[in-house]
Image (spheres, rainbow, N blue to C red):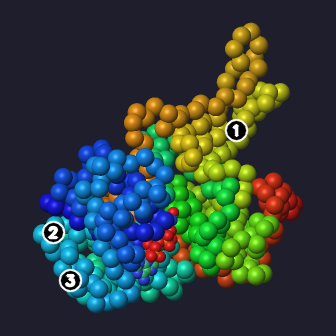
Amino acid sequence: MKTYLAIFGATGNLMYKKLLPAIAALQANNLLEPDTKILCIGRAQHTVESYIETAKTQIQTPINWSQLSPILEYFRMDFDQINAYEHLKNHMNMFGKSKRLFYLAVAPELFPVIAEGISSVQLITQNDALGRIVFEKPFGEDLKTAKSINTMLWKYFDESQIYRVDHYLGKEMIQNILVMRFANKLFENNWNSLAIEKITIIAKETEGVMNRGNYYDHVGALKDMIQSHLLQMAALIAMEVPKSFDVDGIREEKVKVLKRIRVEKEDIITGQYRGYLDEKNILPASKTETAVFMKAYFDTPRWKGVPFYFLTGKKLNEKRSEIIIDFEDNTMQESLWPNQAIVKNQLVIRVAPDEGVTFRLNVKEHGLSNVIKKVEMDYCHDCNVVGNKPEAYERLLLDFIRGNSTLFTRWDEIEAAWKIIDSIKNHVIEPILYQDFDELNRYVENQLKEESK
Ligand SMILES: NC(=O)c1ccc[n+]([C@@H]2O[C@H](COP(=O)([O-])OP(=O)(O)OC[C@H]3O[C@@H](n4cnc5c(N)ncnc54)[C@H](OP(=O)(O)O)[C@@H]3O)[C@@H](O)[C@H]2O)c1
């Protein structure tokens, strides 16, 4: 079957940074069906040649342009003009019968008009097994707006045709969480409050808002990071064993556990980096948070009393995303070796920038002494990969083209996540100012100390 992938927003940052490089990599690895065309749709005046020349200046990743160029087309239209969709249809019809896949790499304000446009001219119809559509995050800005976007989508498409991207789900180590848990008895048997003391989920960035001030000031770290990526990571860590590993089996369990999260208002600290107000397109005296620390509990028998800590922020000490699982103290060990520095076991799942797993354990030092020392067993997931290391967007695009929605979020997951964020947002949380990670961290640690008194 021929495949026609039409991308709205072809002159945007996402297209140049992620989508075109991902398409080129899929093509280079022979993962695109031979009869595939990519329709790049934008409002700038271009021929396909001038579009490709512009793209070349924007894309840093090496791309085999002589291989990619023949499958690219460019179509000019203003997405707001409803009558432009008739022309789009005429253009797409020239390709003949094919799978029709639409990717909306545009701001959410354009979702309704594009969804209406392509369905009004029947480029995609409900129950059409050959038609699918992808929406980029953010999916709404609170529960109310997300619901209204979703109601609009359900008017035009079936749920099975709708793919909502959270690109974290395309990352290798996020996909590995379930394998780590369920394919290793050692972990799954100890994946509960009896063995685990706390779980920390981190996504730190070194950059500030850069040129995304307009978007970011409106949204902030809670909505930009916690609502999507961090809650998705937490759901995969905290969910129960799914009945099956198919699309709905996993999503079912993620939704169930997300509905059981509890966050107390005193357990949220927000911060804003010093200098944020001087960035471009930020409102004077903006109170938007650029960092969030919060403690949450999942009220399920498995996680009774286990704190889940979340930390995300901009302008911090490093770019790092990881999940740290701290196991309980083994008091028996302490009574057996009272004078030894025995550490608690710790499992770290490293998501980015490097991918891998570290497990900390105690061993006897080599030789005649009986000293116990800690060691870290390290598995590097991306060290031995030969050739292309697929990026999250490659995996997501391929799954979308093939019709596998496991790594995309279902509406009820998004709904559950927005309920959590809305309830947090109800508390007025004034961000503290921080210069760097150390300052933010000191504040968080002081708060934690106060709390434990
Ligand atoms: N960039 C990323 O790394 C990233 C990561 C995750 C999610 N996302 C999400 O992906 C979406 C796109 O982000 P982006 O960074 O690519 O945004 P962007 O750089 O602003 O690109 C938006 C695109 O939409 C086009 N556009 C806007 N209004 C239009 C109209 N009325 N008619 C025709 N074209 C119109 C723009 O055309 P012009 O060039 O002519 O203005 C541009 O091609 C957003 O929802 C964003 O949140 C982006």
- Front of the two marks 3 and 2: 2
Residue 205 in sight here:
yes
Q: Which residue is mark 3?
A: 122
- Crowding at dot 3, Cα within 10 Å, few <14 / some 14-19 / many 20+, comes out as some
Q: Amino acid at mark 2?
A: Phe
Q: Quadrant of the C terminus?
A: bottom right
Q: Does mark 3 have its CB less than 8 Å from ligand 1?
A: no
Query: Would you place residue 237 above or below residue 414 in this image?
Result: above
Residue 255 in sight here:
no
Image point (79%, 57%), residue name? 436
- Residue 131, given in percent of the width and then of the height, sits at 23, 72
Query: Would you place residue 360 above or below residue 218 in this image?
Result: above
Q: How many angstroms separate mark 1 from mark 3 (CA)?
A: 60 Å
Q: Which residue is mark 1?
A: 344
- Residue 303, given in percent of the width and then of the height, sits at 59, 58
Q: How many angstroms separate mark 2 from mark 1 (CA)?
A: 61 Å
- Front of the two marks 2 and 1: 2
Q: How many angstroms separate mark 3 from mark 2 (CA)?
A: 15 Å
**In the visual, does 380 lie left or right of 154?**
right
Image point (55%, 39%), residue name? 357
Q: Amino acid at mark 3?
A: Gln
- Residue 443, given in percent of the width and then of the height, sits at 83, 61
- Crowding at dot 2, Cα within 10 Å, few <14 / some 14-19 / many 20+, comes out as few
Query: Would you place residue 323 above or below residue 47 in this image?
Result: above
SS of the residue under disc 3:
loop
Q: Which callout, 2 or 1, points at the residue further toward the start of the chain?
A: 2
